[in-house]
Image (spheres, grey):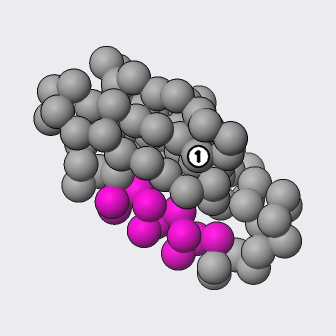
Amino acid sequence: MSEILLMQRPGLSIRYVELEAIILDREADVVHQLNPSASYIWSRFDGNTSIDDIIQSLVDDFQLDIAAATQEVNELVEQLSKHNLLVACTDTISQSE
């Protein structure tokens, strides 16, 4: 099974205010503010946690069904990627089952 690994783009300034992430992108001269659920997902883009594992953590921690968790993560990845806030660590990692 292959899993995608993403990480927060190096060079971003990130602060947490209560449960919301504030991301300063100096390259684009833009500040992004993430709501608590997006911040929870954002914090897991560490280069070691796969998309599948992030989805599973939403299911486990927030009792979401797998479809809702998958949609939420995929939509956030799309938005963050659109703003160049995520980078791929490696193309894929292989895991044996």
Label 1 residue SS = strand
Q: Residue furthest top?
A: 11
Residue 39 coordinates in the image, percent (x, y): 58, 48
For the image shown, how many numbered marks are present on the structure? 1
As drawn, is 4 to the left or to the right of 87?
right
Residue 16 coordinates in the image, percent (x, y): 59, 33
As drawn, is 74 to the left or to the right of 55?
left
Question: Can residue 95 be seen by looking at this rendering?
Answer: no
In the image, 56 versus 10, the foreground residue is 10
Residue type at numbered disc 1: Glu
Residue sitting at x 67%, y 45%: 19
Q: Is residue 36 above or below residue 8?
A: below
Badge 1 density bin: few <14, some 14–19, many ≥20, Cα 10 Å: some
Q: Which residues are magenta?
A: 69-79
Quarter of the view holding residue 61: bottom right
In the image, 24 versus 71, the foreground residue is 24
Q: Residue furthest left?
A: 28
Residue sitting at x 49%, y 52%: 34
Q: Is residue 90 above or below residue 34?
A: above
Q: Which residue is mark 1?
A: 20
- State yes or no: residue 28 in magenta: no
Q: Residue furthest front?
A: 17
Question: Can residue 84 be seen by looking at this rendering?
Answer: yes
